[in-house]
Amino acid sequence: MIKRRKSKELTIGNIKIGAGAPISVQSMCNTDTRDINSTLNQISELAERGCELIRLAVLNKDAAEAIKEIVKKSPLPVIADIHFDYRLAIQCINNGINALRLNPGNIGKRENIEKVAALAKQQNIPIRIGINGGSLEKDIAQTDLPLSEKMVMSALRHIKILEDLDFDLIKVSLKSSDVPTTIEAYRLISDKIPYPLHLGITEAGTLRGGLIKSAAGLGTLLSEGIGDTIRVSLTENPAEEVTAGFEILKCLNLRQKGVNFVSCPTCGRTQINLIELAKKVEERFKDLDKPITIATMGCAVNGPGEAKNADFGIAGGIGEGYIFKKGEIIARVKENEILEKLDEIIRKSSI
Amino acid sequence: MIKRRKSKELTIGNIKIGAGAPISVQSMCNTDTRDINSTLNQISELAERGCELIRLAVLNKDAAEAIKEIVKKSPLPVIADIHFDYRLAIQCINNGINALRLNPGNIGKRENIEKVAALAKQQNIPIRIGINGGSLEKDIAQTDLPLSEKMVMSALRHIKILEDLDFDLIKVSLKSSDVPTTIEAYRLISDKIPYPLHLGITEAGTLRGGLIKSAAGLGTLLSEGIGDTIRVSLTENPAEEVTAGFEILKCLNLRQKGVNFVSCPTCGRTQINLIELAKKVEERFKDLDKPITIATMGCAVNGPGEAKNADFGIAGGIGEGYIFKKGEIIARVKENEILEKLDEIIRKSSI
């Protein structure tokens, strides 16, 4: 239903970005990159959650050196996040990095940039230009424009530096902690450049508030067809970022991953402990790898009808429950047997 | 920044809806409406969270009778949710209800509808036509159109019934549990009718998934200027719906309510336990009634700079932290004294 913006295509390891490729979910390790074991452990944990691309902060030579072994053993393509020091970029490329996040205007004189761009081009290494509303170049920050326009101006300047060097393996992000500013910045740039866009709300906060800001901001852009890869930034275990990323994409029907859970709000008609039951259903089927919808409804009156688009569901009665499939009741069981029975039915099903 | 869709204005109790009035947040009790004390207790709890309108299920005569006392004592305007039985609507209006949610096509013959519309008009009682994607009229459900178009068709049919009776105190909702369908339905109807729109994703699920679906769906519509009042439907304590509603509106700068929390994702640069610290900051200031932004940042290097739009903030160092105000460091304190000091500074401040 969503018509996606057209962009050039990039390849990072085994992941394609842009030009209609599935919108990928990425995250960033919060380990010390020099601690190879901890970093690889976290990458594995994130890969298990479904993460598709992983970014690491490369702050110094030792971190850039660690990249060599990390890239060799990582189950995911690795992106190095580099500021200011072009030598770290060169070192990472030589150590097999799959992509860079680097703003060319921040790594000094033109000959440094030329070296990085030439080597990246030769090795087919994409570069993400990552604009952050809080750290713009002084001359741009001092203009009177709205922040979203300043961010776009900054991005276009960095892009031009690479384009002038005949480098076009570019991806762009424009993150602000203010959701409308972020939305506006991406909207503004979306028809000005042909490159894929990496979406994110920066400094979105802890789990609850961060989910809301990210879902509202990324959801709006994705609904408008904007965005080729996403990172949900949370002040939390990065594994939560991955789960949230897929949940945002799933709810917009942009990716399929596991079960879609539906449940009615409680109301005066509810005859069972619906909140508990809905949580148990989610817990039980959260790792089920079937692209189905399971509905948990409070009453048998509206349950099957209102959730008729669900593949499977349960509706509560007094001390018992009904199990339905595609809107039809197929079993009536005691309250304490609902979950077992539903599980049996779903796992047996060919859907 | 968001240009809102123009609509007629309605008044429900002391709350204005549409025509540029602040987007209001509503919820629904999950008590038995006949249990007057429990219902009033829940209304008070929700009012304390900031809820502005409350809906109650009115399933029978006893519930419609209870409305009399509930309306008298409720701190919030009360909306009765009625299906099928027009006599309950008449009884609620006579008992002082502030608004109805009722689909006129579902309450039987024309003379029933006429009675309700005439009385509602006389008493200035708005009616919300609430379309639910899962319970459409059979003839519409059987057409080959996309669900979003069926929902709009159903809404227009109900609207026409009221308009033909010269009744225009109308509010409309078009809820589906599928986010893109809901977005599309509201987009389609938004320039076809002049009435205010009540937004919601139905059966959105438990807290985490429900927040994501609601923020993505409502966020998209609100960003496009669509929506005059919202309800976040969660399989949770309804108080969570109210908090989530305001968080969605706040992050789009559509309402101001309390503190906006910003915090960076952890990364290899973080020198303190940022996740814990950010949670403590939110806990400490969650009830502070100042429209300020507080940032919690992992490192003193990027902290103040990246969060310079925040009013106040803290940035972690090794065993200590910096407190900043509008991007300038104003204090350097031991790690275990950060919160106390920040609290002191914020409460003293005139912002």
Image: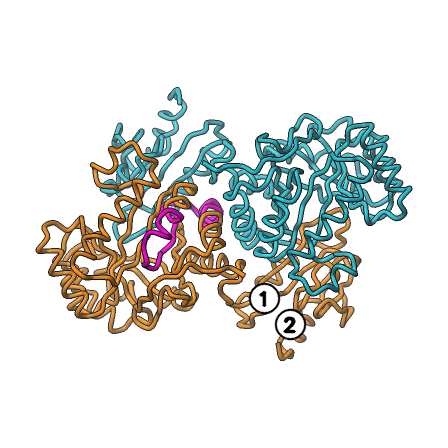
Chain colours: A orange, B cyan
Residue A40 position within the rendered picture, expressed as x and y whole percent measured from the top left: 30, 67
Residue assigned mark 1: A284
Residue lying at 73% horizontally and 44% vertically, measured from the top left: B129
A316 left or right, relative to A138: right
Quarter-of-image position of residue B159: top right
Determine if the magenta segment contains residue A100: no
Residue B104 position within the rendered picture, expressed as x and y whole percent measured from the top left: 81, 45
Determine if the magenta segment contains residue A203: yes
Tag 2 subunit: A
Residue assigned mark 2: A343
- Density class for disc 1 (Cα within 10 Å; few <14, some 14-19, many ≥20) is few
* Image disc number at residue A236: none
Q: How many marks?
A: 2
Q: Give whichever of B265, A135 is nearer the camera.
A: A135
- Density class for disc 2 (Cα within 10 Å; few <14, some 14-19, many ≥20) is some
Q: Give whichever of B272, B143 is nearer the camera.
A: B143
Amino acid, disc 2 = Asp
Give the Cα separation between the discs numbered 1 and 2: 8 Å
Residue A134 position within the rendered picture, expressed as x and y whole percent measured from the top left: 29, 40
Q: Secondary structure at mark 2?
A: helix
Residue A302 position within the rendered picture, expressed as x and y whole percent measured from the top left: 76, 57
Tag 1 subunit: A
Have a look at marks 1 and 2 and say if they share a chain. yes
B210 left or right, relative to A331: left
The answer to the question of whether label 1 and label 2 lie on touching residues, with beta carbons closer than 8 A, is yes
Range of the magenta residues? A186-214
Q: Secondary structure at mark 1?
A: helix
Residue lying at 18% horizontally and 49% vertically, measured from the top left: A105
Residue lying at 19% horizontally and 69% vertically, measured from the top left: A68
- Location of the C terminus of chain B by quadrant is top left
